Structures are given as structure tokens and as C-alpha cells.
Image (cartoon, rainbow, N blue to C red):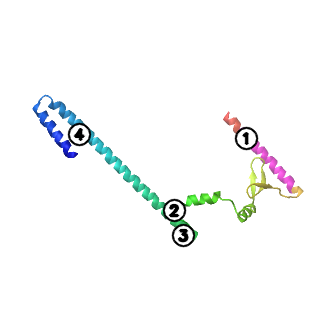
Amino acid sequence: MGKEKSKSKKKRRSSDDSSGSTSSSSDSSQEKKKLRKLKKKLKREKKKTEKALKKKLKEEIKKLKKTRRSSSRSIDGGKDEVSSDIPIELMEKSKAMAPMTKEEWEKKQSVVRRVLDEETGRYRLIKGDGEVLEEIVSRDRHKQINREATTADGNFFQKQTVDKQFFK
């Protein structure tokens, strides 16, 4: 292919040399062709460098993932069960999507926490996933809780109305 092009160019040059008036126009067209070739060459080189950079970046990401996997294995106690084919994130997600065992459910339900309800100002006992429990208290403690809840409820209401006034 390359030899055929060079032969045709030689023929053109010889024909251009014979006609003196068209030599200036053919020179400008040759320069344009050279410029186009240079631009194409620059584009190709740019694409090559971009590809090389992307490839390096992918390799670095793979190395990081491998180091994370190896570090997580060493933390877990070197479990041989972990497959190198499946990413850790996917395994964790699949565990989260799997149904709970009875032991896991009982363990979760046995946790009772005290949560503040900002709207009413009361502390509520929440069991496991969100079941609200009643707390048995004395009459005096009940009155004290109601007083605290009433003041907290008033403060919350005032805060809401003041915020609305500022936004108008």
C-alpha cells in the first residue's frame, strides 16, 4: 500500500513541475494534507496515551481491591471459605438480604433502648426493630414525667412556630 502511494505522489510531482502556474496551488494543498496528517497523528497518540492511563488506573484499582480482600481475610482470622471470585461488598449485601435465623432475631429483639421523642419530650422504651414498650413507674414518677413532657412539648411547639415566622 505504502509503495503505491509514493509512486502516485512521484507522478503528481512530475506533472506539477511541468506546469509552472499550478505549482503554488498544489503546494498549498500539499501543506493542507500534511497538516491533516499531523492532526490525525496527534489524535491517535492522544488516544493511545489515554488508553494507557485508563489501563494503569484499572490495574491500580484491582491491586487496591486485592489488598483490601487480603487485609479483610487476615482480620477475619484467615477464613478459607471466602472465595476470591466474589467481591466482599456483594457477599455482605447477600448476607443482609438473607433471612435472619431464630437466634439472630431473638438477639435483636432482646435489645431494649431508651429513645427521646422530641415532639412530646418523652423517653420511650423501644424493643428490637421498633416495638414501643410501656414502662411501669410510680405515681410520683408518672406526674414528673408528664410535667417534663408538657414543658418539652411546649418548647417544641414554640420552636416550630418561630421557625415558620422566619420563613414567611
Q: Give the Cα separation between the discs numbered 3 and 1.
A: 52 Å
Identify the residue at image location x=38%, y=53%.
53
For the residue marked with disc 4, what is the amino acid?
A: Lys
Question: How far apart, in angstroms, are the residues tagged by discs 4 and 3?
Answer: 60 Å
Say what amino acid the circle numbered 2 marks: Asp
**x%, y% of residue 34?**
23, 39
Closer mark to the observer between disc 2 and disc 1? 2
Label 4 with label 3: CB-CB less than 8 Å: no
Taking 149 as reference, is 100 above or below it? Answer: below
Q: Nearer the viewer, mark 3 or mark 1?
A: 3
First in sequence: mark 3 vs mark 1: 3
Percent across and percent down for residue 134 are 83, 56
Quarter of the picture holding the C terminus: top right
Q: Secondary structure at mark 2?
A: loop
Please identify, in this view, whether the residue under mark 1 or under mark 4 is nearer the observer. 4
Magenta region: which residues? 141-162
Circle 4: is it few (<14), some (14-19), or many (20+) Cα within 10 Å?
few
Give the camera-side residue of 163 and 6. Answer: 6
SS at mark 1 in the image: helix
Outermost residue on the right side: it is 139
**Is label 3 or label 2 in front?**
2
Q: As shown in the figure, which amino acid type bears the numbered disc 3?
A: Ser
* Circle 4: element type: helix
Mark nearer the N terminus (1 vs 4): 4
N-terminal-most mark, 2 or 1: 2
Helix, strand or loop for disc 3:
helix
Marks 3 & 1, CB-CB < 8 Å contact: no
Residue 37 lies left or right of residue 8; in this view the side is right
Residue type at tag 1: Gln
As drawn, the label of residue 85 is: 2
Q: Which mark is residue 160?
A: 1
